[in-house]
Amino acid sequence: MRTYFQPTANLLPVKLTDHYIFRRILQLIPVLLGISIVTFLLIQLMPSDPAAVVLRVANTPATPEAIAAMREKLGLDRPLPIQYLDWLWHVLRLDFGQSFVTGKPVLQEVMHYVPTTLILTACATLLIFALGLPMGIVAALYRDTVFDQVSRLFAYIGVAMPSFWLGFVLMYIFSFKLGWFSVTSRGSIADWILPSITLAWAPAAVYARLLRGSMLESLGQNYVLYARARGLLERLVILQYALKNALLPVVTVFGLSFANLLSGAVIVESVFSLPGLGRFAVQSILNRDYPVVQCYVCLTAVLFVVVNLFVDLTYSYFDPRIRFGKQEV
């Protein structure tokens, strides 16, 4: 009788694994081109003329002559395909133009706010895996016990509670009442705890319930029963056989929900007044600073694609059959 995961998966020729990665990277090219087209067309779909916005920021009367001159200066009077190719050429060199508001290079402005968002997202991701995965595993192993009930209550509260309301509650209790955390300084790791909990709570609750159901299904499979019949240690059966299969849907959902994590960061940054990229993007939208909005959309979309590529490669590690399409290992 064969187990689901065969040791031979680790003995696969290196060329085949590399070929799968190469094909996945090639598939990203049309996706990235589509992202660039949509991002470029954002300005065309905006209700305000970018030339009029530049004149308004510069306190220059937006007469028809001034608007026409500014459109010529910005290159907006050229055919659309020419504008796109010129914009794409500059983007490939990481040149997103200049901000309408500050006049500084857009990429320089954006990179100033990126570290805050990356730190917040990384801390939240660690919390998601540190809380959600163990809770899901324990709930499955001790089904219908007090651990399972606590996990279910945690999931209900996490899904039902809006993140902005959770942030205000945490800030009120632990900052204003107990004084345990600061809401103004960002000088230590402790200052990131409340924002990270706010961002991670709902995803951790979802992953805990998802992993519980997946673990219960895996524990009932024949390969787990066979592993136990062989006399393997229960810890080895759970970690090497049941958990490895049970993580597949969690990995998939994490890749798909990464965009929700970034959009949630916008709310958390606003609640805790963090100088993050999401908050900066919202201000740029309100100011109609179109180059900044273009840069934000483009970078977050590319980041989302890269994260999904990483998730796909991780998925192929857990299930080697993916590297060979429909071929069974």
Image (cartoon, rainbow, N blue to C red):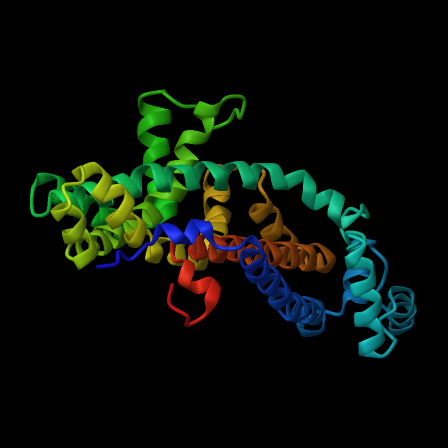
Answer left or right for 245 relative to 320: left
Answer left or right for 260 relative to 140: right
One can see residue 94 in this view: yes
Residue at image x 50%, y 51%?
262
Answer left or right for 324 relative to 319: right
| Image coords of residue 168 (percent x, y) | 36, 39
Residue at image x 31%, y 49%?
244
> In which quadrant of the rendered image does the C terminus lie?
bottom left
Nearest the eye: 123 or 264: 123
> In which quadrant of the rendered image does the N terminus lie?
bottom left
| Image coords of residue 133 (percent x, y) | 29, 43
Instruction: Tell me which corner region of the image, top left, top right, bottom left or bottom right, holds residue 52.
Output: bottom right
Above or below, 149 against 66 in this view is: above
| Image coords of residue 225 (percent x, y) | 14, 52
One can see residue 167 in this view: no
| Number of numbered discs overlaid on the protein picture | 0
Above or below, 281 against 33 in this view is: above
Answer left or right for 146 relative to 123: left
Instruction: Tell me which corner region of the image, top left, top right, bottom left or bottom right, holds residue 114.
Output: top right
| Image coords of residue 136 (percent x, y) | 23, 45
Above or below, 280 against 81 in this view is: above
Above or below, 17 against 29 in this view is: above
What is the residue that sits farthest to the left in this orientation? 145
Residue at image x 68%, y 38%?
112
Nearest the eye: 225 or 285: 225
Residue at image x 60%, y 68%?
27
